[in-house]
Structure formats: structure tokens, C-alpha cells
Amino acid sequence: MATSSAPAASLLKRQLKEMQAGKDIPGISCGLVNDNNIFEWEVMLMISDDCKYYGDPIPFHPNIYENGKLCISILHPPEEDEYGYEAASERWSPVQTPETILLSTISLFHSPNDESPANVEAARMFREEREGKNKDFRRRCRKCVRESLGED
């Protein structure tokens, strides 16, 4: 480990221990992929049964790109959004921790942001369903869940 990353590694070790010991963080389980690399975590998010997204394939969701990467404000660079959807204060800052990022991810599954989507089709379908225009979004999500369970 390079000396320039030593402070970051020390902070992450402390934050990981706090999260593993914390009983007040429902729905998050985490550990290291390799005990020799504090920068690579394995995380399990236990999402409530009423959530529509489980495992593989990559969920059909307004804020998930086709490659599986999340589109979540707090991970975006700390600058003004060129499209005007996010204030700089909603983006990355040094006060973010692994815990705040994971809690934001869980929140995103329950409350998708269709105003700044990664998947435009999913955002459109989500918005139309919310407005009572059709049920295609819910059908598409159910299909993803069935596929993830090996039922389709």
C-alpha cells in the first residue's frame, strides 16, 4: 500500500469495523473481498420484500445503467450539473462515508429518481405508471425478478 493511501486505508478500516459492529444499520452487511485490500468491499443490501429488485440480471431501474453501474448523485463529481438537475451540494463531498453511500443506494431502490435517469426507458415507464397511465414498469420489474430467480 502506498504511503499516500495510508490515511484513506486507516479511515476505511475504522469505518468498516463501525459498520460491522453497528446494530443500528438495518439491511447492510459488508466485509472485504480480500483481507489484504481495504479498498475492495463485498456488500449485501437486504432490501425489503416490497422492493422490486433482486440480484442478477441487472435490474430494470431508472438509476441503473445497462452495465450495472449506479447513477446516484452523491457519487457524481462535486461540481454544478451541466443539465441543472443536481446542485453541487447533492454531489460527492468528503463527508460521505461507505454507510451514507449504501443507505443512499437502498433509498434509491425504494424511491427512483426519474428526473436524472441512467435508463431513460425505465424512467419514462416508471413516471407513466406513477401517473396511472400504464403498468408496463411493474411488469418489466417482475420479469427481472423472475429471471433472477431462474423462473423465466
Image (tube, rainbow, N blue to C red):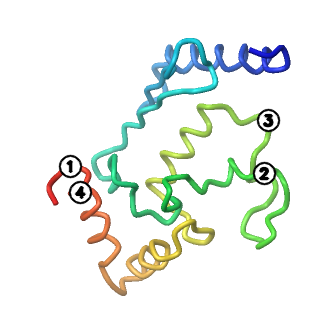
Question: Which residue in the rendered view is the most extreme toward the front?
Answer: 2
For the residues bearing labels 3 and 2, Cβ distance under 8 angstroms: no
Question: The residue tagged with tag 1: helix, strand or loop?
Answer: loop
- Vertical side of 57 occupied by 41: above or below: above
State the count of labels. Answer: 4
Dot placed on the residue nearer the N-terminal end, 4 or 2: 2
Q: Residue 28 in the image: state x and y as whole percent.
A: 45, 31
For the residues bearing labels 4 and 3, Cβ distance under 8 angstroms: no
Q: Residues within 10 Å of mark 2 (few under 14, many from 20)?
A: few
For the residues bearing labels 4 and 1, Cβ distance under 8 angstroms: yes
Q: Which residue is mark 4?
A: 147
Q: Which residue is mark 3?
A: 94
Q: At x 42% / y 78%, what residue is drawn? A: 125
Dot placed on the residue nearer the N-terminal end, 4 or 3: 3
- Vertical side of 18 occupied by 140: above or below: below
Q: Residues within 10 Å of mark 3 (few under 14, many from 20)?
A: few
Question: Left or right of 94: which side holds 56?
Answer: left
Dot placed on the residue nearer the N-terminal end, 1 or 2: 2
Determine the CA span between mark 4 and mark 3: 38 Å
Which quadrant is the N terminus positioned in?
top right
For the residues bearing labels 1 and 2, Cβ distance under 8 angstroms: no
Dot placed on the residue nearer the N-terminal end, 3 or 2: 2
Determine the CA span between mark 1 and mark 2: 35 Å
Q: Which residue is mark 1?
A: 149
Q: Which residue is mark 2?
A: 77
Q: Residue 4 in the image: state x and y as whole percent.
A: 85, 19
